[in-house]
Image (cartoon, coloured by chain):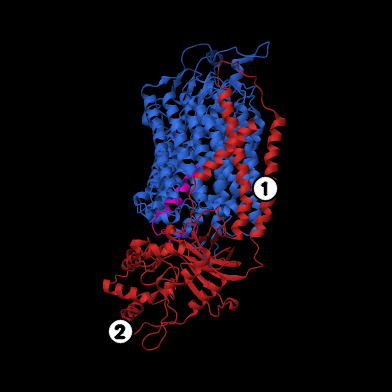
Chain colours: A blue, B red
Amino acid sequence: MAIIERSITTTEAFSVATPSTSLGALKRPVSSTGWKSWLFTVDHKKLGIMYSAAALFFFIVGGLEAVLIRLQLAAPNGKVLNADLYNQMFTMHATTMVFLFVMPMAAGLANYFIPLQIGARDVAFPRMNAFSFWAFLFGGIFLNLAWFLGGAADGGWFMYAPNSGPIFSPSHGIDFWALGLQITGIASLVGAVNLITTVLNMRAPGMSLMRMPIFTWMQLVVQFLLLFAVPVITVALFLLSFQRNFGATFFDVAAGADPLLWQHLFWIFGHPEVYILILPSFGIISEVLPVFSRKPLFGYPFVVFSGAAIGFVGWGVWAHHMFASGLGPVSVAVFSISTMAIAVPTGVKIVNWTMTIWGGKLQFTVAMKFAVGLIVLFTIGGLSGVTHSIAPSDTQQTDTYYIVAHFHYVLFGGAIFGLFSGFYYWWPKVFGKLLNEKLGTWNFWLMLIGMNMTFGPMHILGLQGQPRRMYQWTEARAGEGFFNLGFWNTFASIGSLVLTIGVLLFLINIVITARNGKVAPLDPWDARSLEWMTTNPPKEHNFDSIPTVSHLDEFFHRKYEEDANGQMVKVKSAEQVMKELEDNADAHIHMPSPSYWPIVIAAGLPVIAFGVIYSIPIAIFGGVIVLFGSYGWAIEPSTAPDDDFDPPVTTKDVVHVG
Amino acid sequence: MRRRVVGAVSGIAGAMFLAGCATNAPQDTWQPKGPNAQIIDDLQKPVFAVAGIIGVIVTVAVLVAVFKFRDKGQPIPHQSHGNPALEITLTIIPALILTVVGVFTFRTVFDLAKTSDTEMIINVTGQQWWWEYDYPVQSEYGITQPIITSGQLVIPAGTKVLLRQTSRDVIHSYWIPALNGKRDAVPGRVHLNRIEADKPGIYAGQCTEFCGLSHANMRMEAVALSKADFAKWVANQLKPYTPPAENTLAKEGETVFMNQCVRCHQVNGMKRADGTPVIAAPDENIVSGAAPNLSHLMSRNTFAGATFDLLNKSCREDVWTADSESFGAKYLSGVSEDCLNQKDLRGWLRNAPAMKPMYANPALLTSTGGKYRGMPNLGLTEADIEKLVAYLLTLK
């Protein structure tokens, strides 16, 4: 596992040198197959798959919660859920979708594709990468354990104080919520440091920042947002946990606290969080649209800088979530204007995507359909966003279904459509098989129709006065006429079932593809970026030799050249490009060794959290696990004997990662 | 040609949107009935129009591209990397549109924050899950003693009323869409919210900051009366307490009330047989430290945080649908025995938490030191309920 050897002269398959025993007192795992190879892996690709698989599981959980919510609201005075369960359901639906689906799914894709896109063999800190994944998974499971231990969190994902205090929410739900998010926050922070380091230091020779694939660019912005936003929510969650578990009074009005403190902390994190959710998908479709338009991304530097601009301005708009909180007219006016300002760079992106497909040679694969769908759906969500950047109208709209409509167009029509585009685009790269396009087309149309049926009517519901977060609605406030609020509530609930069938088709597509999917050719989409310059799925070491980059869209420019008439013509097949890389393969490629300790340390975290809620000795026990794990981490030897390391004569011959 | 298509499509989309709406939705945000809501509406209507047009343009552009540039075997297009001039133009245009919108927004924010010309003050206090309305002494309206009420906010029409909002427990939000946008009621802070109704009538609202279990059941109704009718309402609220006649069912009900309800609910002027005043002690029993003051209960149309009607269905319809001239008289007639919504009121007295979810279960009170949130199940007998209803009907 540790070393991949190949003599420069032979054309045989690689031999992977895996020592039968590892060295040292605290041995490293050596298995390269079976469950152990997943549990102790530090391979960014395996971790990326596990991240995404776990996120997909949580997507199903969050989706079921959403369906229960819509069933409850299908008719007046719904009886499917009681008030208590309903409050838990909408709290956990949002928490799950934000923290346990979109964020880790984007993290999974970042993990898998950033090293491939920048021509690296792994991330900068492979063991930390493994730790990030396990911390996310254990945090997510811990969060959901509350369902079985007296009820889940019931204060809404925004968890406003003082309603989140022990008096108003006596179950342990919010304790699990705060500590669970604390753990997933550690995962995000570690991951952000890791990916920033990777992108800044490990790009292939010749890949300047302005030749970097746009997905990696958007992910880089996201990692910086995480790096600065997660500490804010960490502080807020600590205050909350101390208030609930140790009798602190940070949000206790009687003790002189101001509950608006929580709102500021939450939204200073929460608004950058919105861009953390959406920018990866912006990156995905900025890859997909050029590939299936046979054109470069229109205005690449504008897309890069508007992404970075969103990353900056995104810090100055948080109080638009608080226009009704009583901030006073000066703050309200300022945040209203800054919120309008952020619409400009966002609009730039929509212009660029439209101009990318304009004049192209468009192929409507499922990936392309989702990407084009995103442009329109996100535009609708963006425009409704502009209507509530107008602070006075926001005081009519906030906390109504109009907002629910807005952010589902942005996050479902935006973030999730982008992720689905990525699934169909990258599936052959990851698993070597093409997802079924026919089933995928059904998947797309049902999701598109279902999503518009579910969230479209919510614009009307909200503007006609239906508030959010109500476990029941009453006919007394539903108005008259055939198209009254009752009609639209029922309609939206039916839409959610259509949407569910659409998502179900995706899951069926996965199963069908795994059983007897079409084996993907080397370059199924005639793609443009580096991740396609390797086998499907990629070799463990990604690239036989690290390519030298001289273009944005390097792979495309290796395959195509302009002829005398200025026409782009194919001069090399993907196979030929691959062959060139193989012929120049590096002789010794050192890959990082697997490790027991990331999963051990990560397993200690929920034990500590459990102890904080129930009994301090358990927390101390968890602390001991983390300490023991850190010790093992620090002193574990490399699997490979020391003398196996060739001195790095040139970076071309020996590339050592981790 | 293209402009005409865009115009037609946006027209059709707009018409479909409006045709798809409910009529007379009580909380419709696009039906302002007072100057504050009107100012907001004037600002937002053009923004909605511009947003709609831009939405249609983008959608049409994408659809045109989708059909026009479909792969029909054309050669691979020129690998152009963009057009900075076009890009900058298309950045500046939305920036300019937003600048114009921003200027108007700025002005409106400050217009709406204006309180210097206020004509009347009402203190509004939220708690789980009802609002208390407290009218300080304002003799120009005949309010010579403070009035404390709940269930319906009664205001004079055509008067600039300043609500001074706060909360006794968690954050709530006061929202009567026809009169103004929402404003949070935050414990420890006083937030100002100006409302004014053009005409007499009932305007519906709903608490819009998630406030726990019965958030959905925390409703509001603002009742605007003509100035003359408002004066009558004030006079009635200030009327002293008249105990029920001896040897009536209502008198027995008063005794039940003194034994049970008075632990939390005040009725102003009530006295025991020995002449000592009966004072409620909600602080001892309830987390928020307050329960609705039930003096003149039957002058209101709702109870339990405006969740339930005190009027039965037909009497309620009669008041809600009245035109603005006859509305005042109908409202001021209050709740007669014939009009009383017996079913809900009796159900409430029988087992309140079963009708409106509250942590009123004694087994769940450890975190609050034994205090209730909301009204518990009092375990009243049917005979007691009979007496109480008779008594409550006397609180005109």
Q: Over which residues does the magenta segment extend?
A: A161-189
Q: On what subunit does the disc labeled 1 rest? A: B
- Decide: is B305 above or below A624: below
Outermost residue, bottom side: B274
**Number of residues whose C-alpha sits closer than 10 Å to that of mark 1, classed few (under 14), some (14–19) or many (20 or more):** some
Residue shown at 45% from the left, 21% from the top: A16
Image location of residue A190, percent across then percent down:
52, 41
User: SS class of the residue under badge 2?
Assistant: loop
Q: CA distance from mark 2 to mark 1?
A: 69 Å
User: Does residue B383 appear in this view?
Assistant: yes
Q: Which one is nearer the viewer's eye here, B161 or A565? A: B161
User: Which residue is disc 1 drawn over?
Assistant: B101
B287 displayed left or right of B78: left
- Decide: is B295 above or below A64: below
Q: On what subunit does the disc labeled 2 rest? A: B
Mark 2: which amino acid?
A: Asn
Image location of residue A525, percent across then percent down:
52, 21
Sequence-first tag of 2 and 1: 1
User: Which residue is disc 2 drawn over?
Assistant: B247
Q: Which one is nearer the viewer's eye here, A533 or A76? A: A76
Outermost residue, right side: B85
Image location of residue B271, percent across then percent down:
40, 84
